[in-house]
Amino acid sequence: MSPEKVRAFPIDRQVFLVREVAAKLGNLHGETATSFWRAKASELLDLVVGSGRDRTAASDEVRRFFLAVQREMLADPVAESMPILSA
């Protein structure tokens, strides 16, 4: 298969990664959580852009990932009341 026909699996559907980030964020609070998310979002944006997506599409994909992480955090029945971070 030629490289121009290969499409990366969307990061918001990578369940292991979504759960891993949700678990980490669930254990962090305040500025530490915000700093972690910003670093992770930047890392993911670079990863998606590096896979060939333009920056706008990559930003949209990172936003969808963030929403998936929030859904995972809210679905966790053991989770305490957690603040929702803005993307």
Image (cartoon, grey):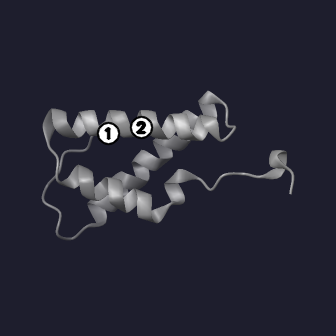
Q: Is residue 42 visible?
A: yes
Q: Is residue 87 visible?
A: no
- Mark 2, residue position: 41
Amino acid carrying mark 2 in the image: Ala
Residue 3 lies left or right of residue 25; in this view the side is right
Q: At 21% across and 54% down in the image, what residue appears?
A: 26
Q: Secondary structure at mark 1?
A: helix
Residue 11, position as x, y percentages in the image = 53, 52
Q: At 25% across and 44% down in the image, what residue appears?
A: 84
Q: At 41% across and 46% down in the image, what residue appears?
A: 66
Residue 5 lies left or right of residue 58; in this view the side is right
Amino acid carrying mark 1 in the image: Trp
Pointers 1 and 2 in contact (CB under 8 A)?
A: yes
- Image quadrant for the N terminus? bottom right
Residue 62, position as x, y percentages in the image = 49, 41
Residue 82, position as x, y percentages in the image = 17, 51
Residue 51 in which image quadrant: top right
- Mark 1, residue position: 37
